[in-house]
Amino acid sequence: MVRFMRKIAFFAFILVVAAVSASGCVGGTDYSEWNDQIDVINSYVNKSVALGDAIETAYDSGNYELALDKVDERLDELDSAYDEIQELRDIADDYDEDFLIDYSSLWSDHTEQIVTYNENLRNAILVSNILSYEDDANVVVDMALGQYLDSQDFFNSANYQAAASTAELSKQKWSQVYDAVAGAEEYASLLGVGFIEDYTGYQVSASDNAIKAMEYLKLSANAAKTGSIDTANLHLDTHNFYDAALAADLQSIQDVRAMNPEAFADEDNYFQNIADNYLAAMDAAEAAAADISDDLDDIESEHSDFFEER
């Protein structure tokens, strides 16, 4: 199911600055230290660039967990590059060349924008991952709830055999729901948006309470079949406890939806407003990085005797 209004556009452009010629000297100064540091930085940048295809391929195939892993790898490479660019800035200070100081500062700013882009990309993929698990839960939750209610009806009409067998079927379906929403909850905790954490948390609690309610209704029905009324009533009391807890969880889920109507406005695009915020931040970072890249190009053009052609 498509959740985002538009496709995530992967921003593969990450500046790779060509190393200064190893023999290039200006005013008799040896720039080998600059060259060596450029090589170190570019080793991290090139690894980051190489991860772009892997991220996009994983996302397009719906393998959001792999896409997240690759984004995290890219962020690690970018963090290392950023740290090394700060070292380059110190080297530029030692040379006392204004254009090198400006150049290294701009490169640092550019890398910050790329990090911002990828942090928001990571969050956008987290939203996709959460919704993928929600889709898995939605496949079975209606049947799970229907069988839940049917088992109670069978029990109330003293059809204990049907109540027990239907409760077991419902419990199995709720177990599938639990596995799916537990996955959603895990990624919601990584995203860190409060109401989404609450929403998935209530879903986990609801499915857990439903599983327990069905187990005890089954036990009560089986006891009632054999005439063990005291045991049946004991299990029924426990069922009623979890049934009430389930009802409270379902109400809490509805409360979260009511308090965040914009996030649930489109049943096929939950959390669209959240996703749009991340996509907008990605666009802004991309534009800022492009502007900085133009400034770097200008410095290279003005000092073409120093910089190798990319």
Image: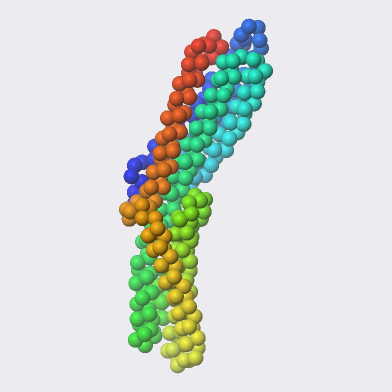
The residue at the point 51 percent across, 16 percent down is 299
Rendered position, 287 above or below 220: above
Rendered position, 295 above or below 175: above
Residue at the bottom extreme of this rendering: 227
Residue 82 seen in render: yes
List x then y, in percent, for residue 116: 50, 36
Q: Nearer the viewer, residue 304 or 273?
A: 273
The residue at the point 34 percent across, 86 percent down is 157
Residue at the top extreme of this rendering: 27
The residue at the point 46 percent across, 83 percent down is 236
List x then y, in percent, for residue 262: 36, 52
Residue 187 seen in render: no
Rendered position, 123 above or below 222: above
Q: How is the image coloured?
A: rainbow
Residue at the front extreme of this rendering: 259
List x then y, in percent, for residue 217: 44, 80
Quarter of image, res 8: top left
Give the number of marks: 0
Q: Nearer the viewer, residue 181 or 65?
A: 181
Quarter of image, res 58: top left
List x then y, in percent, for residue 135: 38, 57
The residue at the point 42 percent across, 89 percent down is 225
